[in-house]
Amino acid sequence: MDSELSLPHEMTFSTLGSAAPVLAPRVGKLALAGRQTISTPAHVPLTSRGAVPHISHDMVRKETAINSLYIGLEDFIERKHPAPLYNFPAAVHESPLGKFICAQDDTTTVLGARRFPAIPCPPNNTETSIAISTSVGFRQLEAHRYVEAVQKLKPDIAVGLADLVLGREPGLKRREKMVDRTHAYTRDALEQLYGKSVADEQRSQAKYFAPVLPLDNAQQTLYLHDLEGEFRDRISGLALYESASLSHIPKSLGSLPRLLLSEPSSPHEVLRGIALGADLLTVPFLQACSDAGIALDFAFPVPATVQNRGEPQPLGIDLWSSEYAKDSSPLVEACECYACRKHHRAYFNHLLAAKEMAAWALLQMHNHHVLDGLLAGVRESIQRGTFDDDVQVFNRAYKPELPDPTGDGPRLRGYQMPAAGPNQPRRMPKVYGRLDEVSQKFAESQSSVATPDTDAEGLERHGFAEKI
Amino acid sequence: MPSALTFDCHAKCSSTKARASTLHLPHGSVPLPIFMPVATQASLKGLTYDQLRDTGCMLCLNNTYHLGLKPGQEVLDAVGGAHKLQGWDRNLLTDSGGFQMVSLLKLATVTEEGVRFLSPHDGSPMLLTPEHSISLQNSIGSDIIMQLDDVIATTSPDHARIKEATERSVRWLDRCIDAHKYPERQNLFCIIQGGLDLDLRKQCCEEMVARDTPGIAIGGLSGGEAKEEFCKVVDTCTGLLPENKPRYVMGVGYPEDIVVAVALGADMFDCVWPTRTARFGNAIVNSGTLNLRNQSYANDFTPIDEGCDCVCCRPTEKGGLGVTKAYIHHVTAKETVGAHLLTMHNVHYMLQLMGAVRQAILDDQYPAFVRRFFSNIYNGDKTKYPEWAVGALRGVGMDLLEN
C-alpha cells in the first residue's frame, strides 16, 4: 500500500519508463488530492450499495489493501429525489458519497451511473436519460441528474454517462445512436461541470473519465475526435468497456489513465487487458468466486514450484468439495491473507455447507489478496521488462478457465440479477406460499438448519444418534 | 466430581442477590455476570473471530445439534475439536442438543433411553441418548458442556409429564456424568428442570446439587412463560444453589430480563436474539430497540447509538467507522455487511451492558444501576415499568419505583 498523499484538487497520472503511449503494458502512479497514491495497473474493487460485498468496513481497513472503490449511483437513488446520501452533512471539502458509505478518507471513490456489472434493463435509454435498475424497480436517470450527482456527491473520479446496450448485440442503427447520445451526454456534462459559464468555485473537482464505447473505431470517429480536441482539457481519463477498445485510443490521449470496466473470465484475460495498456481494472470474477466457495490460487510471475509441476494448475480450489472436510491446511500454502493466517480448508468446507456468511467474508479477503498479489507482480514484471515472457509462462502454467462452481452462493437480491422475462421459470423457489400443512412440512424438510442432509447411517457415522 | 474451572466471587450486592465474580476456564477468565453470544454453527453470523474478540467476548456458544449434523463427529475428531475448527482460542460452551431436537424435529418422542426420532431423510427410527450427546460434546471439546435433559415447555399443562421429565433429567445427569470422558478439561453443567412448579424445582435442585457438577444451569425457561413465573423460578433456584458455583440461566434474553435475573442471583446468560435481531435491522440501544429499516432513519446521519464506543458507532476521529443510522438503513437486509455491522454493535452493546452491571455490583450500586436502566428504557415514566420486574425486584429487597 502506498501512503503518499498529494496536494489538494489535483490529479496526476504519470507513467514510468518509456512505454509506447498505446497498446503496450505500462506502470504508473495515479495521485489524487488527499488520497492514497494508486500504483497502476491496479484493481478497482466493486461495491454493492456502497459496501465491498461481504467484508465489513473495519476488516476492509485492517485486512485488505483496498484503496479505491467503484460505486454505482443507481444503488442509492430509489425513491424520490434527493436521495438520502445527498443530504449527508459533509464539510465543504468532503465527499458526501464517501462519508455516507463510511469509506476511509484516503480511499479514491469512482462513481458510475450504474452498478458494475450492470443488469440489462427492459426500458430503453433515451436522448436525455439512461435506464437504471434500483432495488425497487427500473427507472430513468436523466443525464442532468447524473451531472448533479457528480457536483453534489463529489466523487474523486466520475465515469461519464454512456448509452450502452447490455445483454445483446446492438444493430447498426442502434450503434449510431449510441455514439450520438454518448457524444451529447459527454458534451453537456463537461460543459455543466467545468464550462466557462460555471463560476470558478462552482466548478466540479471530480475527475471526468470519458466513456469509449465498445464499438469499432470507425463508428465513433467523430466522438473520439472531439475527445482529442474540444473535450481534451476537461477530461482526466478514459473509461472503456472491452479490452478491444484499448486499440482505439488515439495517441494524443495516450497519457490519460484508462479504466477498463470489463468482465474478464479469468486472470489470463486480466493480463490481456494489461498487455493492451489498461491502468485500472474491474474484476467481477473475484466476488463470483467468493460466492461460489472458490479460493483463488495463482501468482504472477509464476513461482518455480508451480512451473515445475508440469501440467497446468487449477486457478482456484472449490471448497465445497468434500475432499477438504478434514483438511487443516490453509487455503493456499504460505498465503499471508487474513483467512489463510487464521483458518484452514476444513473450516471453509463446513461454513459453506452450513451457509454461514463468514465463508464469503473470509473468501473475499483471500481472493482480494491473491488478485493484489497478481497485480503487484505484474507491475514489477513490466518494470523489469519481462512482462510478455512472464505472461506466456503464466498461460502455460495455469488452466485457461476458473473452476466451475459446484455449490450454492448467498441468496441473490433482485437488484443483483436480471429481470425475469415473460414465460420464464421463477428466479427463486417460492419460500412462502399457502399455509397448508403439506407445504409447511415440505419447507421444513428442506430447511438446512432444522434437518440433517444425511440419512440414518450418516447420522450414526456423525455420532449423532444410533439406529434402533 | 472433578472440575476444570475455578469460581472467584468478588462482591455481593448488599440489597439484592446480585453477585460479581470471575470464572476461570481452560481458555481464559470470564468476568461474571456475562452474556454469551451464540455462534450456532461455529461462526458468529458473518463476524470474524477477531471482530468478536474486539467486542470483549471471552465465552461464546456453539450448538451441539448443529455441529453434530455439520461437520459431524468424525470431522471434529480429525481437526481436533471445535476451537481448532473455527480458530477461536477463547472459551466455548455447548448445549446438549436436546432442546433443538425437540423443538425442531416435531416427530421426536422422549423415552427413558433417550430421544427417539425418525431420520428425516429415510424415515429410519433413531435414538439420541445422553451418552451420544456427551460423546459429541467431548469431540467438540467445549470448555463447558451441558447434560442432555428432558426438555418440555414450561407452559405444558401436563403436570405428570413435567414431573417425569424432571426426574428423568436427574437420571440422565447420572448417565452424562458416567459418559463424560474429560472432566479435567471440560466442565459438565447440570440443568435444573421442573417447569413452573416450585416444589419440583426445589427437589430437582437438591438432587442435582448433590451430584456436585462444576456449574449449574436453570433450564426449561424462555419458552413463553409469564415473566412473573420466570422470576419466581430463578429466585427459588438461586436460593437453593451453592454460593461457590456459577449459575447459568439458559436462553435468556432481553436486556431487561438479564438485568432483573442478575438481581435474582444468576451469573450467565445466552440468547440468539441480539444477533438475530441485528440481521433484521434492529439495533439495541439504551432506550430499547431501534428498527433501522424504518423510513424515518433514511436521513438520520447520527451514529447508531450516541456515546457507544463500538467500532461502528465510534466517530472516525477516534478510529471508528462513523457508521450512521442512514447507512445501516441503506444496507440492512440487503447486503451481508449490514448484518455484520449491526451484529458487532449489538454484541458489543450486550457485553458492555454486562460490564456496567458487574461494575455496579462491585461498587455496591446495583439497585441504583437497575433504576437508571429502567428509567432510560421507559423515559422516566414509572407507570410504564413492567409489573413483573417491579415485583421480582421487590422480592429481593429492592424497590424499582423508588427515586
Image (tube, rainbow, N blue to C red):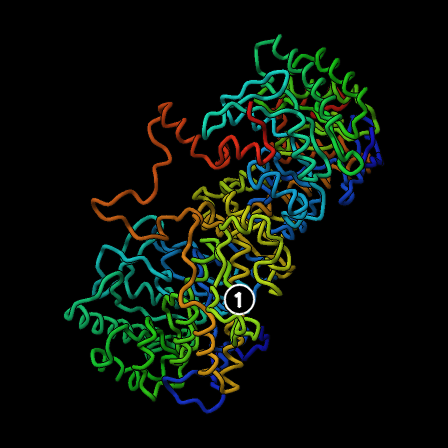
Q: Quadrant of the C terminus of chain A?
A: top right
Residue ranking furthest to the front: A310
Q: Is residue A190 left or right of residue B25?
A: left
Residue ranking furthest to the bottom: A18
Q: Is residue A468 left or right of residue B172?
A: left
Q: Quadrant of the N terminus of chain A?
A: bottom right
Residue occupying the point 23% across, 48% down: A421
The vertical placement of A198 against A460, above or below, is below
Residue that numbered label 1 is attached to: A370
A334 and A119: which is toward the camera: A334
Residue A158 placed where, x, y %? 39, 70
| Residue count near mark 1 (Cα–Cα under 10 Å), binned few <14, some 14–19, many ≥20 | many
Residue occupying the point 49% across, 22% down: B106
A356 and A118: which is toward the camera: A356
A46 and A410: which is toward the camera: A410
Residue A352 placed where, x, y %? 51, 47
- Subunit ID for the residue under disc 1: A
Amino acid of disc 1: Val
Residue occupying the point 55% across, 61% down: A366
